[in-house]
Image (tube, grey):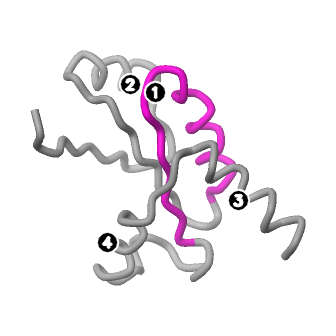
Amino acid sequence: DSFMKCCATFGKVLSPVQAHKLKLKGVKRLIFGYDPDALGMMKKMGRMYTNNFDVSAIWMGNENIDLGASSRKAILNAFSHSQPYSAFRRNLVFNKLNG
């Protein structure tokens, strides 16, 4: 099907049981987006699920504000610029080395 299936966690963890349930429902893509202070957890979740899902990431870190404090426009912009997890990790390393 071509419609979007959405799921949100309240917290930082997507458990293996939750991921399995998403897989059973036909979810193929996960987009992780965490607040700037939770970058480590976003990297961990991305690594955990890359083999079972098409994993992408959004990052509000450039603005250094939490998703909950972001404007609708900023969040939609972040989602429209989500990137595959592998590119997200590469860009983080590049930015740390050059930033």
- Secondary structure beneath label 1: loop
Classify mark 1: residues with Cα within 10 Å, few (<14), some (14-19) or many (20+).
few
Distance from label 2 to label 1 (Cα)? 6 Å
Distance from label 3 to label 1 (Cα)? 26 Å
Q: Position of residue 84 (x, y in %)?
A: 52, 46
Q: Quadrant of residue 64?
A: bottom right
Q: Quadrant of residue 53?
A: top left
Q: Is there CB contact under 8 Å for labels 2 and 1? A: yes
Q: Residue at coordinates 38% horizontally, 80% vertically from top-left?
A: 74
Distance from label 3 to label 4 (Cα)? 20 Å
Residue at mark 1: 15
Q: Amino acid at mark 1?
A: Ser
Q: Residue at coordinates 57% horizontally, 82% vertically from top-left?
A: 63
Q: Nearer the viewer, residue 17 or 77?
A: 77
Q: Earlier in the sequence, mark 2 or mark 4?
A: 2
Which-is-in-front pick, marks 1 and 4?
4
Q: Is there CB contact under 8 Å for labels 1 and 4? A: no
Q: Is residue 98 left or right of residue 35?
A: right
Q: Position of residue 92 (x, y in %)?
A: 73, 59
Residue at mark 3: 91
Look at the image and give the residue range highlighted in magenta: 38-60
Distance from label 2 to label 3 (Cα)? 26 Å
Circle number at residue 76: 4
Say whether residue 86 is magenta: no
Q: Is residue 12 left or right of residue 9?
A: right
Circle number at residue 19: 2
